[in-house]
Amino acid sequence: MSVSRRDFLKISGALIVSFGAESLAGPLVHAQGPFDTHPSHIDPTKLDSWIAVAADGTVTAYTGKCDFGQGMFTAQTQLVAEELCVSVSRVKLIQCDTSVAPDQGTTSGSQSSPTNFNSGNLGQAAATAREALLSMAAKRFGEQSDQLTVADGIITGKSGRRVTYAELIGSHRFDIPLSATAKRRSQEQWTVLGKAVPSLDRPALMTGQFEFVHNVRVPGMLHGRVVRPPDVGGTVASVDESSVRQIPGVVKVVVRKDFVGVVAEKQSQAVQAARQLKVKWNTGVGLPPQNTFYESLRKLPSRDVLVVDSKDVEQKLAGAGTVVRATYVYSYQMHGSVGTSCAVADVKPDHATVWSATQSVYPTRSIVAKLLGLPLEGVRVIYVRGSGCYGLNGADAVSFDAALMSHAVGKPVRVQLSREDEMAWENFGAASLIDQRAAIDQKGAIVAWDCENWETSRGGRPGYDHPGNVITGVLAGFEPVTVTARAAEEPKGKLRNNNNAVPSYIAGCIDGKCGGGGTIRSERVLFHTVPSPFFTGPLRSPSRIQNTFAHESFMDELGARAKADPVAFRLRHLSEERIINVVKAAADAFKWERRPSPKPNIAQTGIVRGRGIACVAYEGDNGYSALIAEVDVDLASGRVMPKKFVVAVDAGPISNPDGLRNQSEGGILQGMSRALGEIVTWNDKRVTSTDWESYNSLYLGSDMPAIEVILMKPTGVPATGAGETAITVVPAALGNAIFDATGVRLREVPFTPDRVRAALLAQRT
Amino acid sequence: MGTISLRVNGKLHILELDPATPLLFVLADELGLRGPKFGCGMAQCGACTVIVRGEVVRSCVMPVSAVGKDEVTTLEGLGTPEKPHPIQQAFIDEGAAQCGFCLSGVMLTAKAVLDEKPDASDQEIRDALGGVLCRCFTHTRMLRAIRKYADAKRKV
């Protein structure tokens, strides 16, 4: 079925206005992609794949980077408005729909701003469109392009003649490639970007009218619930379908290898049937004891990467006056979305539509096609916002659950996970064990730093090919990507620090080229990836929060050993200007008093106060932050009460300062929740932290620290990621503040009251 | 199955359903309301919050039959995007959300406590919000918006 471009724009207009499932479930399922491209085959090198101007002057823009609540919808709308010189209200952004939006992979890794706001993709498309429109107008007026002015989609010539974008192009395609040379509007010219444009979703969100994926309703839709194994690695022995036959509304028990689900007419019936279904499960694989788990990681077969090695570290350590060693542990943590994951799938014999909160619509399309044996072109995945994900939560798995169940019943099925299924089976943030060793010379300078890291891994993002990377795929018979043991090769090429395995203070030299942020030239970083009993996957600041906790805590230990002020000690070993600047900015704003930690004359009872700093160059060069935490510690209970946070963030040019503040504030509190309370627990068979009583989160009733966010304004640099820079430094800043207050060093996240109390008691004995 | 009459946001609905059905599923699935949401099913997070008899209720654990003749107010019952309730306006002004999934619990709980006690202190407001989760941790903005709403309400 062919839809004219004009019709398409009409439909897409409706799509964005209502976000409505009804409009989506209708004719659009069969609609072709924009401008007669093959559905889901959208050529990102063509301008028409990104930008269309309708007859009424409305600009429709298509993006593969979606909004989960981090503000990307508003920021990208600003970007298009800015580059095209139209008002925000004229731009309709369509995000992450495999039928109409270009494949931009996964919205993750703090990559949306670098991808779409710098030299290519969406921003470049909008600039290309502006230049094309200006040259059309120039031709019409018989003037030069650079003599024209443009405001809100109206071009005015030197002669005073005026023409609108709609008159120039409305309802026609540009038919030109994306121009790499189209001039981008400079930060000084910005009128829309850089402004605190209120997030466009606010009125609908605050009044309960915003459509989440949980609210998608498709005519004839049924409700599904999954029945997961009780134990990790459990497999189906038998399923007694008769056990739910008497429940009204039950449509089908769906079994595919070890995948079990029930489909019913109503949600409550599905819930009841899932609870009542009798499944005989084979025992699982068994789990290692939690108390010795982290130390055991050293002995596992590992995939090794030698990130940097100056080859003289052992020698320097052996010859040094002072050698400091410490081991840090970071526990498994959860995404723990407040809403359990949900998706709706409508699978027909030859095609399927999935409404999903996935970060990866195109990869999800591939996996759904693979699971159902459908051709790729027959699957459409439409992103609809879910509950905040912070990485790979259950959104992908539940999309596959819905697809399998809809496939089995031939009707649209909505699946929402139970709280227990969400928390027991999500891809956790990895657990890590990190050994640090460093040598300090007589002048109190660090002269060698050695870091060895063991990080757990099982599965991860399914990507385009690996359904088994999340629970549903494994249950349906696919293998997860597991760790293949491999010895490290010699480092070569450019220093790669995209997981922050490299501390900021080392020079990071490979073949004479130094890509690190610091001055320490005797350096080695060896990273082992080891198998995990649980699924793991990206959780806000994956690897980076674990590594930065170890680096920034250790830096504090070294400073304390050298009796140096923590800020001065950092500055002494840093060479990278932008990280130096955030450290200075945070220290100035906090009115940091220069002295070593711990603070002198610590009280032995009551509540003591301390301050700590941590900083990071996120992924080496994708954003910079420094955070100072001020905490009270109750010496009797071990409770840590953060009182104040001051963070300086450098994200390059800021698209929306309000959005960046919101991300930084939220990141800090999420970091505080993770640092002080969040930990996945398990017994010998299964995960035991499966609700909000067994997995601690900071509630809204908790005492809130004051938060001050300082936004750096560097010039002449590209945009970086912004959503993960603040959270990355929270655990270390808190640990360092606790040390400052008490003299006790905590080397294992989270710093629960029990652990703090035990450490305080150990110090006294 | 049974016949249930349910008054929600000023409208009376006559429904044929199992009276044991959780109120949340009735609101979300039968009436298509988007405010109350399933977060945990165990009254631990607040995402499903509605107001009945002036009190906050976790609709995920309340059978629809328990509502009786009382009016149920959901987040969309307070105001509209065009004409938001003052507490919604305060949240809009403060940008007090990220993903926004938790908002029913946050706003309705705050509204209920301030309806009951207009001069509630920050501590009393926080106590009321003790069982409400926001996993984007938009806490500071939310508490600021609630304070702003409370102060404006007291002046009226």
Image (tube, coloured by chain):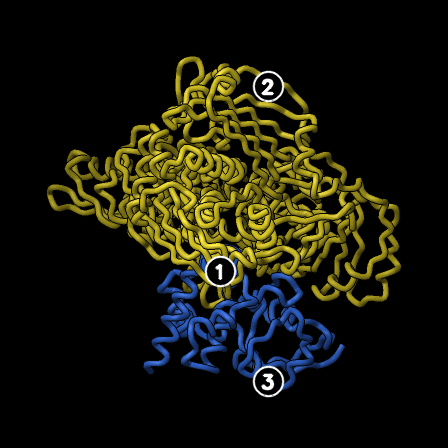
Q: Which of A121 and A517 is in front in this view?
A: A517
Q: Are marks 1 and 3 on the same chain?
A: no
Give the structural element (helix, strand or loop) at label 1.
loop
Badges 1 and 3: C-beta atoms under 8 Å apart?
no
Q: Position of residue A420 (x, y in %)?
A: 69, 56
Give, as a three-letter code, the residue at label 1.
Gly
Residue bearing the label numbered 1:
A606
Of badges 2 and 1, nearer the viewer stands 1
How far apart in space, not on screen, are marks 2 and 3 (Cα)?
Answer: 68 Å
Q: Could you tell me which quadrant the N terminus of chain B lies in?
A: bottom right
Q: Colour of chain B?
A: blue
| Above/below status of A110 relative to A674 | above
Q: Which of A23 and A294 is in front in this view?
A: A294
Left or right? Give the position of A542 relative to A74: right
Q: Colour of chain A?
A: yellow
Q: Residue at x 41, y 32 (%)?
A: A562
How crowded pointer 2 is (Cα within 10 Å; few <14, some 14-19, many 20+) is rated as: some
Residue bearing the label numbered 3:
B70
Q: Residue at x 16, y 33 (%)?
A: A144
- Sequence-wise, which precedes: disc 2 or disc 1? 2
Give the structural element (helix, strand or loop) at label 3.
loop
Residue bearing the label numbered 2:
A488
Q: Where is residue A129 in the image (x, y as percent from the top left)?
A: 32, 38
Q: Nearer the viewer, residue A614 or B103?
A: A614
Give, as a three-letter code, the residue at label 3.
Asp
